[in-house]
Amino acid sequence: MSNSRAPGRHFLQIPGPTNVPDRVLHAIAEPTIDHRGPDFADLARTVLTGLQRVFQTSGPVVVYPASGTGAWEAALVNTLSPGDRVLTVRTGWFATLWSDMAKRLGLEPVVMETDWRRGADPAAIETALREDTDHRIRAVCIVHNETSTGCTSPIAAIRAAIDAAGHPALLMVDTISSLGSIDYRHEEWGVDVTIGGSQKGLMLPPGLSFNAISDKALAAAEIATIPRSFWDWQPMLEANAGFYFPYTPATNLLRGLREALAMLEEEGLGNVFARHARHGAASRAAVRAWGEAGGMEVQCLEPRDYSGSLTAVRLPEGESADGLRRLILQGFNMSLGNGLGMLKDRVFRIGHLGDFNDLSLIGTLGGVEMGLRLAGVPHTPGGVDAAMGVLTGSTEE
Amino acid sequence: MSNSRAPGRHFLQIPGPTNVPDRVLHAIAEPTIDHRGPDFADLARTVLTGLQRVFQTSGPVVVYPASGTGAWEAALVNTLSPGDRVLTVRTGWFATLWSDMAKRLGLEPVVMETDWRRGADPAAIETALREDTDHRIRAVCIVHNETSTGCTSPIAAIRAAIDAAGHPALLMVDTISSLGSIDYRHEEWGVDVTIGGSQKGLMLPPGLSFNAISDKALAAAEIATIPRSFWDWQPMLEANAGFYFPYTPATNLLRGLREALAMLEEEGLGNVFARHARHGAASRAAVRAWGEAGGMEVQCLEPRDYSGSLTAVRLPEGESADGLRRLILQGFNMSLGNGLGMLKDRVFRIGHLGDFNDLSLIGTLGGVEMGLRLAGVPHTPGGVDAAMGVLTGSTEE
C-alpha cells in the first residue's frame, strides 16, 4: 500500500529558512491591511523600534520587501561608486557570492583567502589596510556567521583592526544567519551597515531584509554614484519618519515580524543567544563522538569562531554528504543543509537556529546518527548521548 | 463603554493590496520548506508554468522576492544602458514614479503628458517615434492600468503604433493592477517586458513581483550596461531551468501563489475578466447616479479606457475626499484608496479587483453612499440602486 503522507511535523534543519513558530504563521495569515491606513503606521512604528533593539542600535534600520541578497546590494549601491575597492574575506560561499555581486555592480573586490574552516583574521585585515596607504579601499565587507561553514568572524576585533590601521573604510557586516541567534551589536561595535534577513533567527519566512545604518554610512550615501532607486535609503528613511514606506511594503510579513520581535523580547535576547550557543556546543559534542575513530569532523577549526546557528560536518573522505542527506530526508522527514562551493558533497550542515529547543535538537541529532548507520558511513555511535551530556550539564563540550 | 473592536470583516477596498482569500492565507501559513529540496522544485514548476498562462505567454516569467516597484527596476536595468532614452506617458501617479525611477537609474525619460483622465494615446506615441529618426528612444514604458486614475491604456494598439512607426524600441508594460483582473496578453500583443505584482489580481499579500520576458528583451540584456545583480535575469533563468532560484525565494508566498493560480484556473481567466468588467460598470453607474445633479464624476473620461480593477471618483469642487475616506473608515470599517499626486484629496478610489463578488461590491458602494450622506457631500441618492440595476441586467451601464 502506497503512503504518500509523511506523518508528523517535518524537521526543517537547514541553517535557514528556519522553523516558523505557529504564532508567526498565524500572524502572517491574518487578512492583508491598507498599507496607507492608521493601523499600518502603528505596525510600522512597533517593528522599526523593535528592530533597533535586535540590531542593538539607536540609529535607523530600514526594511526591504526583498530577501537577504537584496539587502547586500542595498548596502553596496547606497555607499559606493563604480571602481571603488572593497576588501572582502572569503570565509565561505556567502562571502564569495557577496564579492561576486560587488564585481557585477562595477566595484573592485580585493579578496583575502581562507581555508573555509575559520572566520576572518583581524590582524590580516589590519595589515591589508595599512598597505592601502592611498585609501582606495572604501569598505570592508564581512560575513558575521558564514552559513556555508558554521564559522563566525570577530566583528569587534575587526573594527579595532580598522581603527588601529587608521583607515577610513566603511565596515559592512552580513548578519543574515546570526541576527537574533548570536550576540551582535551594530552600534557598540562601530559597524556602518549591517545586513539582516527575516528567515533565520527572526523566525519568519523569507521575504524581508534589513540595513542598519551608521551616520558615516549616511554621509557616504550622499556622494555615492552607483545608480539606485529601489534600494535607495533616502526616500525610505523619509517615509519611515512617518511610519510609512515609499512603495508597497510586505504587510503580512511585517505582521509576522511584530509577533517574532515580541517573542524574542519575551525570551530575552541574552537567553536567545545562550540557547543557540548551548545547542552549538551539544551538536559539536555529537560530531566529535561520531568522529572519535577519525574521519568525521566539525568543519570549523577555531573555537573562537564556533557558531551557535549551525554546525557543518565533514564526512570521512570518499563518503557522499548529499547521499546521506537524501537518505535522511526519505527515511526521517528531515532536511539538512548541503555543502556549497568547494564543500559540495563533502559536508552537510545542521541548522540549530531560530525557534528550536533541546528535544528538537536531540531528534535532529538522532536523525543524523540513524542516517549514518543506515548509509553505512564509518562512525562511532554515541553522538546523541554526548549531546545529552552537554545539555544536562554532566559533560563539557 | 469603549469599544475597541470593529466587528465583522474589514472591507479592504483600496485598489490593492486586495482581500486575500482564506485558501491563500492558509497556504502561506503552512510551515516553511527547504528551498533546495525536492518539494520546492515541484512548487516552482507549478507556479512558473501557471504564471505563463496568466501572462498569456510561452516565454519565461521570472519571480522576484520583492514588491512590484522592484520588478520595474528589473525591467529597466536588464535591458538599458546609462543615458538611454525611454518614452513614457504620464497617465497618472504610477507612470510618474516609473519615469522618476528611470531618471534615478541614469536613463533619460521623454515624458508625454496627459490630463490623468484617459490612457496613453497610440497615435501620439507613433508620432513621437517617427520623429525619433536616429532611434535614441530604446524603450516605451506604459502602465496598463493606472491605479491612481482607473484608466487603462490600449496595449495592442500601442504595439501596432510602434510597428507602424518602424521603430525598434522595446515595449515595457506595468500590469501590476491589471494582471489577473483585466485581459492582458504578453505574447500576442508583442510586449517585451511585462511587470506584475502579487498583491492585486493575484490575490496575494505584497512581496512577489514578476517580469515576463520576450526574446528581443533577452537579446537587449546581453548588451545592457546598467550595473545589475539582484535583478539580473540571466542567473534567475539558469536556476529556474531546474526549478530553483539563485538566492532565497519567498517560499511561503510562492505556496500562496500556487493556490491563487489554482483558484484563477478554477474560475477561468475569461470569467475573471468578465467579473471585473461587470463590477467596473456597476460602480460607474453608482457614481453617475450620485452625480446626477452635477459635481461628482468618474475620473476616467474615455469609455475605451474604463478599468475593471478600480473606479476613481472625483468629488464636487471644495469637498475633501480624504475627510470622506476617514469618516467611512471610522463609521463603516472600510478602507478606500486616496488621491495621489495632483489628485490628492480630490478623488477617492474604489478597488473592485481580486477576490470579490456582487454582494461585497454592493456593501462597498453602500458604505460610500452612507458616507456621502453623513459627510454632507452634495450628491443624489440612488447609486447603490443603480449598481444593482446593472448587476441584475435590468439597466445598461
Image (cartoon, coloured by chain):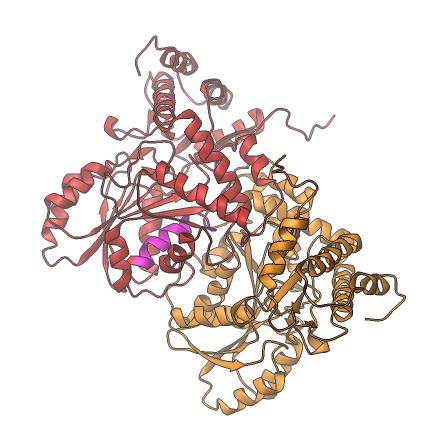
Chain colours: A red, B orange
Residue at the spot 52% in from the left edge and 39% down from the top edge:
A256
Q: In the rendering, at what x and y percent does residue B59 appear?
A: 60, 64
Q: In the rendering, at what x and y percent does residue A358 appear?
A: 45, 18
Q: In the rendering, at what x and y percent does residue B391 appear?
A: 84, 62
Count of numbered tags: 0
Q: Is B33 or B277 nearer to us in this picture? A: B277
Magenta segment: A65-78
Residue A372 can be seen, yes or no: yes
Mostly what secondary structure, the magenta segment?
helix
Q: In the rendering, at what x and y percent does residue A8 appear?
A: 61, 24
Q: Is residue A91 above or below residue B234?
A: above
Residue at the spot 54% in from the left edge and 30% down from the top edge:
A329
- State which quadrant residue B55 falls in: bottom right
User: In the rendered image, which quarter contains the N terminus of chain A?
Assistant: top right
Q: Is residue B128 above or below residue B371?
A: below
Residue B179 can be seen, yes or no: no
